[in-house]
Image (tube, grey):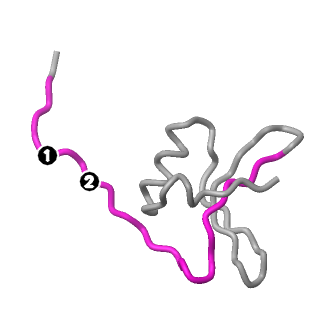
Amino acid sequence: MHFHFGKEKTIQKEEYDRKNKIPVIRASICTGEQVAGFKDLRTGQFEEIMLIASEADKTAFLERYGIEPSELKKVW
């Protein structure tokens, strides 16, 4: 068995336009597929970032952009 000790890998937070975009999960009513991304408040356009296949994916998205779970909206 190998054990690795040392510094934990830090996640570099990425920025998004918090004034003009909101974080959302777009879910398909038919297939249940979920995609995380950002909705432009001015145009309504959705910017797809990543597929959400598990709770770990959702957590990774939140951590990557420094988003609180309460900020994330679900749209159908």
Q: Residue furthest top?
A: 1
| The N terminus sits in image quarter | top left
Q: Nearer the viewer, residue 72 or 34?
A: 72
Q: Position of residue 33 (x, y in %)?
A: 75, 42
Q: Amino acid at mark 2?
A: Thr
Q: Are marks 1 and 2 in contact (CB under 8 Å)?
A: yes
Q: Residue furthest right?
A: 30
Residue on which disc 1 sits? 7
Residue 70's label in the rendered image is none
Q: Secondary structure at mark 2?
A: loop
Residue on which disc 2 sits? 10
Task: Tell me which segment is drawn in magenta.
Answer: 3-28
Q: Quadrant of residue 75?
A: bottom right
Residue under the point 57% across and 83% down: 19
Does 39 appear above or below 10?
A: below
Residue under the point 69% across and 70% down: 39
Crowd rating for badge 1 (residues with CA inside 10 Å; few <14, some 14–19, many 20+): few
Majority secondary structure of the magenta segment? loop
Q: Amino acid at mark 1?
A: Lys
Q: Quadrant of residue 12?
A: bottom left
Please say whether residue 14 is one of the residues in the magenta stretch.
yes
Crowd rating for badge 2 (residues with CA inside 10 Å; few <14, some 14–19, many 20+): few
Residue under the point 15% across and 21% down: 2
Please say whether residue 27 is one of the residues in the magenta stretch.
yes
Q: Position of residue 63 (x, y in %)?
A: 42, 54
Between the residue at mark 1 and the residue at mark 2, the CA separation in whole angstroms equals: 9 Å
Does 63 appear above or below 57?
A: below
Q: Nearer the viewer, residue 12 or 29?
A: 29
Q: Secondary structure at mark 1?
A: loop
Residue under the point 64% across and 48% down: 51
